[in-house]
Image (cartoon, rainbow, N blue to C red):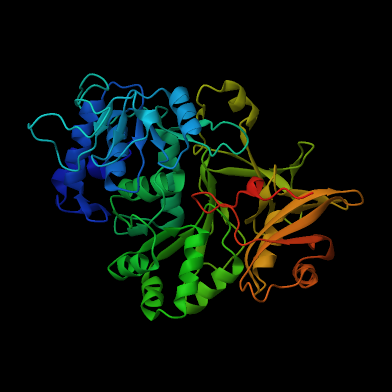
Amino acid sequence: MSALFPALDARSLAANPSDRPALRCGADTLTYAGLARAAGSLAVRIGGADRVAVWATPSAHTAVAVVAALLAGVPAVPLNPRTGERELAHILGDSAPGAVLAGPGDVLPAGLAGLPRIDVELTEPGTEGPTTAGPGATEPGTAGPATAAAEPDDAEAPALVVYTSGTTGPPKGVVLSRRAIAASLDALADAWSWTADDVLVHALPLFHVHGLILGILGPLRRGGEVRHLGAFSVEGVARELGAGGTMLFGVPTMYHRIADALGEDTGLAKALAGARLLVSGSAALPVHDHERITAATGRTVVERYGMTETLMNTSVRPGGSPRPGTVGTPLAGVGLRLVDEDGSVLGENDGETVGEVQVHGPNLFSGYLNRPDATAAAFDGDWFRTGDMAVREADGAVRLVGRKATDLIKSGGYKIGAGEIENALLDHPGVREAAVTGEPDPDLGERIVAWVVASDASAVPAEAELADHVAGLLAPHKRPRVVRYLDALPRNDMGKVLKKALPVVG
């Protein structure tokens, strides 16, 4: 297998101008030559470690740390800086990193005090002595013997261990191989015509697949440029897209704020219209926001579907007809099927028959770290059980309707996906946010419950009005039987609604 980063290869750097921009985050900018020096030097310092943790702030230091680990062939474990004490202890105990890589100014929690710390420099360190930063700092090289930083070619070698959110138990370490990362990024490049000429703009967290693998490693694999905003702002998006950005990655909460600002900001509309590709992921983008962005910019937002264990599975192709509500068709090399509860494979592409998404292909993870039992349970033969429920349209496009554990509602003999009801609710002008769950009902088995945040607290839409709205768009049996109103929905760092954090009623 070829190296993950052809543009960082010494021969490539010699053949191309050394000042080609690779990464910009805030005030920090690195060319490909600068990135090669900084990451290469760090790779020598950590060479020989079994694993290293990375304090994954939204910074250039995180990017350099992860690239260095990949160059050294040392699996990196990205740590969410907002992780709680108990979860952090579990991740460290499970992954057993030999050191933690962090920016020189980062203040680390007490839970990391027992690990050797290696500060990540954005320039090649000189000979002025070891870099230290607070308690737990250590001299370079204590993570293992210094070795030459030569990027390995073993396709099955573990590259990253990314921990799941832990919504159904302690977080599991998802082992992602170099093969999986390369296959997924190359499939996206094929689907999106992603090249070295592209300049990606985003403000996603760097401890997760979306922001780190797609948003940082993706541009670097192509030999292009990434501009990370550090923190999301509409102004930052407009500035960077207006200054040559060609692609924007975001999550629905970001696009919702963009859609809200478009009516008053002609510069933002112009910047978005000039972008080649707008991509939304991690959760469904409401149809209303799709429509507002397209109306103001002439651009459609492309949605794609993936998860930590599978990386990317499907995508809407740019340039086609708008497809709000779908996540497109399978990427090159990805097999996808829908499976009924009895294990039978569904063949209907009718847009109505709900089944669990199962996938196979080179994009799949290698297994859960230290959890062979969980790994075995996650597969049906060679097919990974995603736990996501979906229907397929006549042309094979996938429309997700929710998670099997939380979003499949069995009501009155029907299997109903919460996601399509949520999208219908969001189509009502009086609804700003919506979540749908099921709760026991003596007659229906389960009744549909809508959790709604009103667009205007002084004009809250009535329960009957919302039920009729859903029934008119979908079908009578999909209308909510109960509507509960909240000031805000609980969400995680990626903007996904945490349904298990909704208030307990009854």
Residue displayed at 67% across by 76% down: 459
Indicate the position of residue 152 as horizontal and vertical percent values: 30, 28
Which of 140/6 is in front? Answer: 140
Indicate the position of residue 491 as horizontal and vertical percent values: 56, 52
Q: Is residue 228 visible?
A: yes
Q: Classify 189 as above or below 296.
A: above
Residue displayed at 67% across by 72% down: 428
Residue displayed at 40% across by 79% down: 265
Indicate the position of residue 29 as horizontal and vertical percent values: 21, 53
Which of 492/367 is in front? Answer: 492
Q: Residue furthest left?
A: 127
| Left or right placement of residue 230 versus residue 346 in this view | left
Q: Classify 375 as above or below 428.
A: above
| Left or right placement of residue 462 versus residue 165 in this view | right
Q: Quarter of the image holding residue 271?
A: bottom left
Indicate the position of residue 240 as horizontal and vertical percent values: 31, 65
Which of 297/222 is in front? Answer: 297
Q: Is residue 321 visible?
A: no
The mark tally for this picture is: 0
Q: Classify 426 as above or below 382.
A: below
